[in-house]
Image (tube, grey):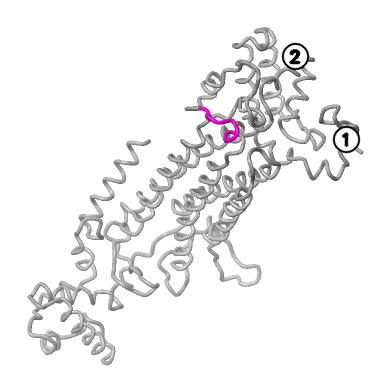
Amino acid sequence: MTQSKTWSDRFKTALHPAIAAFNASIGFDIELIEYDLTGSIAHAKMLAKTGIISPDEGEKLVAGLEQIRQEYRQGNFHPGVEAEDVHFAVERRLTEITGDVGKKLHTGRSRNDQVGTDTRLYLRDQIQQIRAQLLEFQGVLLDLAEVHLETPIPGYTHLQRAQPVSLAHHLLAYVEMTQRDWERLGDVYKRVDISPLGCGALAGTTFPIDRHYSAELLTFSKVYANSLDGVSDRDWAIEFLAAASLIMVHLSRLSEEMILWASQEFSFISLKDNCSTGSSIMPQKKNPDIPELIRGKTGRVFGHLQALLVIMKALPLAYNKDLQEDKEGLFDSVKTVKGSLEAMTILLREGIEFKTERLTEAVNEDFSNATDVADYLATKGVPFREAYNLVGKVVITCLDAGKLLKDLTLEEWKSLHPAFENDIYNAIAPKQVISARNSYGGTGFEQVKNALKAARDRLNSVE
């Protein structure tokens, strides 16, 4: 058996060593120590304010907790499995520092509301950091988009050449996705920003605590109105994991495109040495490891979301030990999202180069301007569906002859329909095809220029 008991004298013996290790969370919830100290300081101040402990005792508790903070930051505080979790580790060290006064800190609270408070404090900080990273990522996308406003790139549907678009327009699609991510996290923050401190184990407390005061000290916007809900709610963690999953979806989609673009078959981008690796046996290889890793890590975040949903789906009120399993997935998801955003931002900023000549060549070697032939005829009074069917025949004619639309002579065009004139060649030129799509939100250069300015103004207003 272990040498000491964590629990009250209700227990005659301590846990079996293997069970103690299985039960302990100190190995991962040490991540919360700074937040546990901050929450405990607020609780101590509240106890003193309400007269539950004396002002002198409150000051001693706060000083002791700040001492532990410094010990931890200096690397001199290393609690082990015997502490079970970060909360007991702090309380045990506090009692060593302050004596019996340290034993009063836990008055009016439970580990259930304590861990809920710590985790919310942690996640508030992490959400703000991730939102800042999203803004930085947007800035890099906008920098690239401004350079490539008039750079064409094939647009795809079903991974088949569809219509040429502005590369800036393509990049701006990811700016819009990450803007939703940024806004979504801001909405999640509202549900994280609620204090459970003082809910106790499940039913509140008999002590005359002031939950609003402790919430104010911790800058929570409000407090849980129901103690049962306060200690057992993990909606906010699920919402965060859902938002994190969507961030990873967007990064993974961009990653997949970059993997394709870097391939010899596409050759739309080149990878720089500082953001790619080689092969252990094939010396010619240059691998897109960053986007491949991001694509792979996306599944981890999805898994953590699914795991927490499964944990919560059948839990009766209020706290259950199952909820200890919320933290490792949450911590890992935060680290995965932050690491992936940082890596992708670096890759876009300094690790790739768009091959503009190849991109221009690409939009000149296919039939992605076929829709514009139909649009051309429609402007000449030909019903669009009739024009659409006619252009299908034009494409077949070109394929049989081994030609592209631009290679047809005016006589050949007129033989297909008398409405064709010499201006058809300008109408189907790739840059004109792009420029002509000037509807709001379209890829027309004027629209993209406006979208760039709007996105930059929006970013600057936040920064």
Q: In this view, does 419 lie above or below 71?
A: below
Q: Is residue 121 magenta?
A: no
Q: In this view, does 243 lie to the left or right of 361?
A: right
**What amino acid type should be assigned to the residue bearing mark 2?**
Val
Q: Is residue 453 above or below residue 208?
A: below
Mark 2 neighbour class, 10 Å CA radius: few under 14, some 14 to 19, many 20 or more: some
Q: In this view, does 88 lie above or below 440?
A: above
Name the residue: 7% across, 85% down: 418
Quadrant that contains the N terminus: top right
Q: Mark 2 points at which residue?
A: 101
Q: Does the magenta stretch include residue 229?
A: yes
Q: In this view, does 322 lie to the left or right of 18?
A: left
**What amino acid type should be assigned to the residue bearing mark 1?**
Ala
Query: Pointer 2 and pointer 1: residues touching (CB < 8 Å)?
Result: no
The earlier-in-sequence mark between 2 and 1 is 1
**Which span of residues is magenta-colored?**
223-230
